[in-house]
Image (tube, rainbow, N blue to C red):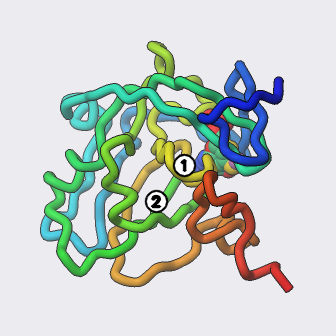
Amino acid sequence: MSKTNNPRLPPGQTLTEQLPVLHIGDIPAFDIDTWTFRIFGLVENEIEMKYERFLALPHETIIADFHCVTTWSRFDNVWEGVKTGKIAELARVKPSAKFVMVHCKQGYTTNIRIEEFFEEDVIFARKLDGADLTPEHGFPLRLVVPRLYAWKSAKWVRAVEFMELDSGGFWELRGYHNHGDPWKEERYGTLFKS
Ligand SMILES: Nc1nc2c(c(=O)[nH]1)N[C@H]1C(S)=C(S)[C@@H](COP(=O)(O)O)O[C@H]1N2
Ligand SMILES: [Mo]
């Protein structure tokens, strides 16, 4: 790890070369027969797809920096997968939807504002730096939201829920900031502030 004056490094962050592994709980096993990806809530067309169908969706690649609230950042991660806009097309999100809740195997959740969920660089990633995600980095599928702290980049994603009202995810309910913009150092929320 090294400190730099790199303008790409948000305040309080330190650059790391290797992508660290960080999560709560055990790494879930992947079973292609039981794995499903579900889109529900405020949508016209609720979807539950199997892995083969997800693989057949058009894939794209983004290159983005990754900033964890515990102060490490890794630059130029190459993520390949399906952009959130494609998912919305299939599900036909209702105009009343203003927030999403991302649900993972093992119960981890995180909430995101809908306009930020649909930014151009937000992707359900299957690959990192040209190789399939490893189990510890979220195989077979993780969300990547590069403009927010990495706790919003949920690993082992299984469902996305479209909601009208905001609701806290796992870390958002435990003191992390509800929004999490690394450039504004939105690290901790109001729950534990005096
Ligand atoms: N399902 C799940 N996703 C998660 C987490 C978690 O605990 N469970 N931790 C988050 C946090 S805090 C970070 S920093 C990133 C780390 O991703 P990495 O382990 O691939 O570096 O995953 C995020 N996604
Ligand atoms: Mo993190």
Residue visible at 30% across and 48% down in the picture: 84
Position of 110 compared to 130: left or right? right
Place of residue 39 in the rendered image (x, y in percent of width and height, measured from the top left): 29, 59
Q: Which mark is residue 19?
A: none
Q: Secondary structure at mark 2?
A: strand
Ligand 1 has an atom within 8 Å of the beta carbon of the residue at disc 1: yes
Contact, mark 2 vs mark 1 (Cβ under 8 Å): yes
Place of residue 72 in the rendered image (x, y in percent of width and height, measured from the top left): 75, 37
Indicate the quadrant where residue 141 lies.
top left
- The C terminus - image quarter: bottom right
Other-residue count near label 2 (Cα within 10 Å), few / some / many at <14 / 14–19 / ≥20: many
Seen in the picture, residue 69 relative to 101 is either above or below; the reply is above
| Residue marked by disc 2 | 102
Q: Is residue 107 visible?
A: no
Residue type at numbered disc 1: Ala
> How many numbered badges does the structure rendering display?
2
| Residue marked by disc 1 | 154
Along the line of sight, which residue is nearer the eye, 179 or 154?
179
Place of residue 164 in the rendered image (x, y in percent of width and height, measured from the top left): 34, 81
Residue type at numbered disc 2: Val
Position of 99 compared to 171: left or right? left
Indicate the quadrant where residue 188 lies.
bottom right
